């Protein structure tokens, strides 16, 4: 199975090690057709890219898209953080970014739960506790919170579902299928078990494989995710695979 696009890569704008251009060059080297620079959004206390810095990244990614247009499609993405049910940190013009700055539209929006984000309601407080091993969140409510938020902010994919906090798979997978949102099989940390991947596929979910690279050499490194998808028998439901839902 060949993966044709990497929609999930980080850079030295957050806690990654390479520049956006180094990620793009690595993607070209690996023969990818598309790469997204998808940094952590602003609510992440340690790694969030916000304000003028996010704007600078936008300009840099736009310049790279032009410079390498003949070799690869370069997209501007953002990995947003679940803050509460129905709330994430996808930037709103005038609120999170300098007034008048035209940041939108993002090409790719990811949404995930991360523990470096201050929880703002019961469900994310539960998730916070679960991520530190000191409590549990209701997995159905976690799934509903992700879906409600994803719908409101027009999110394209859920990054590493069930990492840090469990989400009820039938609820998440059916809802994602209904909304047309992809579930990521994350190659850095495969977050769904074989049984969960199978169940999600049976409930109609479609998947996207992402590297979640934090260094340029890991861009386009999908080995762990491919293995998990093959083991679970869900390769036909992967949108960025040569044998999957999207023609390469
Ligand atoms: Zn993440
Ligand atoms: Zn990430």
Image (tube, rainbow, N blue to C red):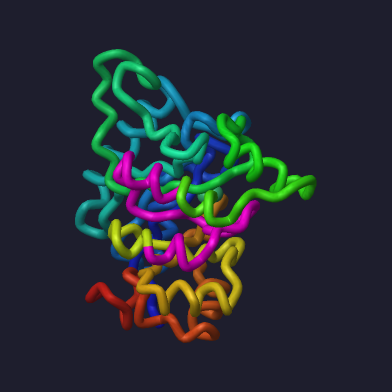
Q: Position of residue 77 (x, y in %)?
A: 36, 44
Query: Residue 4 versus residue 142: which sits nearer the camera?
Result: 142
State which region is magenta.
Answer: 146-174
Measured along the vertical axis of the image, is residue 213 above or below residue 79?
Answer: below
Residue 203: quarter of image: bottom left
Instruction: Answer whether residue 34 is visible to the viewer in this image.
Output: yes
The answer to which quarter of the image holds residue 27 is bottom left
Residue 90's spot in the image, x, y percent? 39, 34
7 to the left or right of 224: left
| Above/below status of 164 relative to 239 | above
Q: Is residue 41 above or below residue 202?
A: above
74 vs 142, nearest the viewer: 142
Q: Quadrant of the N terminus?
A: bottom left
The single residue placed furthest to the top in the displayed view is 99
State left or right for residue 90 relative to residue 217.
Answer: left
- Say whether residue 192 is magenta: no
Q: Which one is nearer the viewer's eye here, 13 or 128?
A: 128
Residue 44, compared with residue 65, is above or below; it is above
Residue 151 magenta-drawn? yes
Question: Which of 18/126 is in front?
Answer: 126
The residue positioned 64% from the left and 49% from the top of the image is: 137
Q: Quadrant of the C terminus?
A: bottom left
Q: Residue at x 67, y 41 (%)?
A: 128
Q: Position of residue 166 (x, y in %)?
A: 61, 58
Residue at 42% across, 65% down: 173
216 vs 150, left or right, is: right
């Amino acid at each position: 199975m060949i993966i044709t696009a990497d929609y999930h890569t980080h850079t030295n704008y957050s806690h990654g090690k390479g520049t956006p251009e180094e990620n793009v060059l690595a993607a070209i080297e690996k023969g990818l057709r598309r790469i997204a620079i998808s940094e952590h959004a602003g609510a992440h206390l340690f790694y969030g890219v916000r304000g003028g810095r996010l704007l600078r990244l936008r300009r840099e990614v736009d310049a790279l898209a032009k410079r390498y247009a003949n070799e690869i499609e370069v997209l501007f993405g953002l990995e947003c953080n679940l803050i509460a049910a129905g709330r994430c940190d996808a930037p709103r013009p005038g609120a999170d970014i300098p007034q008048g700055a035209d940041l939108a539209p993002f090409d790719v929006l990811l949404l995930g739960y991360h523990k470096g984000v201050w929880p703002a309601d019961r469900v994310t407080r539960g998730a916070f506790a679960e991520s530190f091993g000191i409590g549990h969140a209701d997995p159905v409510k976690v799934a509903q919170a992700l879906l409600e938020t994803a719908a409101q902010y027009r999110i394209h994919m859920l990054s590493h579902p069930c990492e840090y906090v469990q989400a009820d798979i039938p609820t998440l997978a059916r809802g994602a299928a209904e909304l047309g949102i992809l579930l990521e099989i994350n190659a850095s940390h495969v977050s769904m078990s074989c049984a969960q991947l199978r169940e999600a596929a049976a409930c109609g979910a479609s998947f996207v494989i992402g590297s979640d690279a934090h260094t340029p050499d890991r861009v386009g490194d999908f080995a762990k995710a491919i293995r998990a998808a093959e083991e679970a028998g869900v390769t036909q439901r992967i949108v960025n695979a040569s044998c999957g839902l999207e023609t390469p």
